[in-house]
Amino acid sequence: MTTKLIDLRQAREGAPDRLSELQAYLAQLVGESFRFARISYGDELTLHFGDLRPARSPKLRKQPYGAYVLGVRASPWLLKSGNAPLVLSGGIDIGITSDFGKPVSKEELAAHPFVELDSVVLRAVPFVIKPSNALGLQLRFSDGSTLHVLPSPPAADENDEQGLPALADWELASPGGLLSAGPGLVWAFKPASSTGSESMQTGEGN
Amino acid sequence: MDPEERREFGDYIEQCKRNGERGSGEDGNFTHGEPRDKVPEFRGEKA
């Protein structure tokens, strides 16, 4: 058995297989307990894991945050519940006609996120979505639930509007730093000590 | 803003919407520079 150390504090040159490096950075999420889901600004689904901490802002005193926060940004997602025969989809076209299924409000999703509380993340696996050349993400939970994040290509004028920088397709905030994937096959990890500055580790998902 | 503060700020904007504040966008969303205007109150720099 080979033992490997993933150092989240310093820069490293990426190995040729960048997707496996991305998976290595995701390893920090494995074993963390699911705490709750929250819909954030822009209807972004966020999943919180690990120890809970209070918000830094005095305006959010009653809102806890997980030590690990997965945000799917504007990416479509699909959640299969492990404790009930239910599938939830967000922003995804899987051929369901509009009169099938029922809308779920932000409040309903937050109150009943369809993943058993304290379920542990067993696997966090990135994968390449060939048609859209994007980095997908699969999470598997100990209660049998699975989450797939399935980024779609941005509209041609989406990022040029107002000169805004391109949004990541999904990101994982952790005590070690911020891991962000996309758009496209690029990803980056910024250690917490350098947040807001240049990325320390970047790669392409090929 | 660092990523942690940015995330909290997004949640604060959602909280404002739940409390009945409306932006100028569709469905009352805060658009363009409106969220930026709320940064001082989010940070507790403004009542």
Image (spheres, coloured by chain):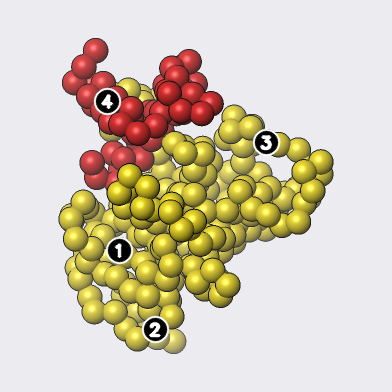
Chain colours: A yellow, B red
Q: How far across and how far down the image is residue A65, in percent?
A: 40, 38
Tell me the SS state at disc 3.
Answer: loop
Mark 2 residue type: Asp
- The outermost residue toward the top is B47
Q: Chain of mark 1?
A: A
| N-terminal-most mark, 1 or 2 | 2
Query: Quarter of the image holding residue A171?
Result: bottom left
Labels 2, 4: one chain: no
Q: Quick check: marks 1 and 2 in contact, CB under 8 Å?
A: no
Residue A104 is marked as 3
Secondary element at tag 1: strand
Residue linked to disc 4: B37
Mark 3 belongs to which subunit? A
> x%, y% of residue A68?
40, 50
**Residue linked to disc 1:** A189
Is residue B27 among what the camera can see? yes
**Circle on res. A156:** none
In the image shown, does A173 or A196 lie closer to the viewer?
Answer: A196
Q: Chain of mark 4?
A: B
